Amino acid sequence: MMLEFGKELDNTVQIMTRNYRGLAALDESVGTMGKRFLAFDIDNTAENRRHWREILLTSSPEFTIAIGGVILFTEQLDQRADDGKTLPELIQELGMVTGVKTDLGQASIAGTDETVLQGLDKLHERCRTYHHKGARFSKFRAIFPVDEAKGYPSARAVYINAFTLARMASICQQCGLVPVVEPEILANGTHTIEQHANACTRVWTAVFDELKAQEVDLTRMILKTSMVAPGLDSTQHIIPADIAQMTLNTLMATVPAAVPAVCFLSGGFKEQESTGMLNAINLHAARLGKANAPWQLSFSFARALQGSAMKAWAGNPANEETAQQCFVKRCRANHLAAQGLYKG
Ligand code: 13P
């Protein structure tokens, strides 16, 4: 299929992924940012939400060696740094591209604990507006809880979310935004790594079946998803090498080689744990070789990039520089992990 923005999409993918870069997910919705701020008694005002993003983006430019794209929440597309530039202008000036969260959250499926992502209505118009404001890629997330006793993820949730993710990806490509397709198979729970792998297999298979059925150009998208691991409350004893092996086996069985990059979310794992898992995945991928692990395997973390930085800041202007140093440290560590070079 010919895409009007084909060359621009290629260019965007290149900037997002060049030299093992990852993505910084700074796209917490107003509600989610409120939860993050609450832990430090920071008021959830538009100004504080803007200021937090500005603190991170004005860290030592060293962080841009690790980050190719920054995902913002829609509110931030219009916000300005103290020097008057819009945040997308600041991001562009730093040599990165701006992404935007385009889903409108989740709606529950009646009588279940499962959800469907929202946001297809008027998505064309919204994407054109975001592109006009400087966004060049878009992220949208479907969430799948894992619970074997309840049969989750159910065939129904998998089908509806896969269809919706693919439809959103198609619209984004049509409007000049590289889709970052995010099926998150939740880490919350007591499931084993085998149960998580089984859920990931079913979800990723369905998502790629739909992407192909809807003729999404797989070379002009990025998969953002979970590393295959036991649940956060599982008692199963696992080492990062097991996570690496299970993640790559599952990706190899389901994700076409045409996809340029897989950027993992951190999912509630701690900062260093997430980095260690990503590093193990890349060490294992290097052993398998490009023929068996053809994608760039990088990161699109939110909590595992911002956690220690926000703790250091805690809303106090005197701590901003320390917060920036924490952010740069996590960016650098994850960039090393994306090459299998992180030493812990
Ligand atoms: P975490 O890395 O905190 O899981 O968030 C990733 C993300 O952006 C979810 O959409």
Image: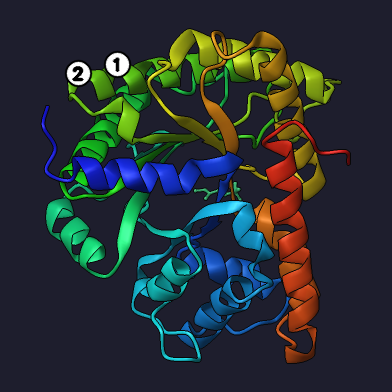
For residue 81, side relative to residue 55 (left or right): left
For residue 234, side relative to residue 203 (left or right): right
The quarter holding residue 134 reads bottom left
Identify the image quadrant of the N terminus. Answer: top left
Question: Which residue appears at 53% of the width and 63% of the height?
Answer: 32
Kind of element beneath mark 2:
helix
The three-letter code of the residue at mark 2 reads Ala
For residue 259, side relative to residue 282 (left or right): left
Disc 1 under 8 Å from ligand 1? The reply is no
The quarter holding residue 243 reads top right
Question: Which residue appears at 18% of the width and 46% of the height?
Answer: 5
Rendered image: mark on residue 213 = 2
- Residue 21, placed above or below residue 245: below
Q: CA distance from mark 1 to mark 2?
A: 6 Å
Question: Which residue appears at 41% of the width and 84% of the height?
Answer: 85
Name the spot of residue 28 as percent of width and height, x first.
50, 62
Name the spot of residue 148 as percent of width and height, x first.
57, 17
* Residue 192 visible (yes or no): no
Say few, some or many: other residues with alpha carbon within 10 Å of mark 2 (under 14 / 14 to 19 / 20 or more).
few
- Residue 108, placed above or below residue 153: below
Q: To which residue does mark 1 refer? A: 209
Question: Which residue appears at 72% of the width and 12% of the height?
Answer: 287
Name the spot of residue 304 as percent of width and height, x first.
69, 51
Name the spot of residue 195 as percent of width and height, x first.
62, 15
> Quick check: marks 1 and 2 in contact, CB under 8 Å?
yes
The three-letter code of the residue at mark 1 reads Asp
Say few, some or many: other residues with alpha carbon within 10 Å of mark 1 (under 14 / 14 to 19 / 20 or more).
some
Kind of element beneath mark 1:
helix
Rendered image: mark on residue 275 = none
Task: Name the image colouring.
Answer: rainbow
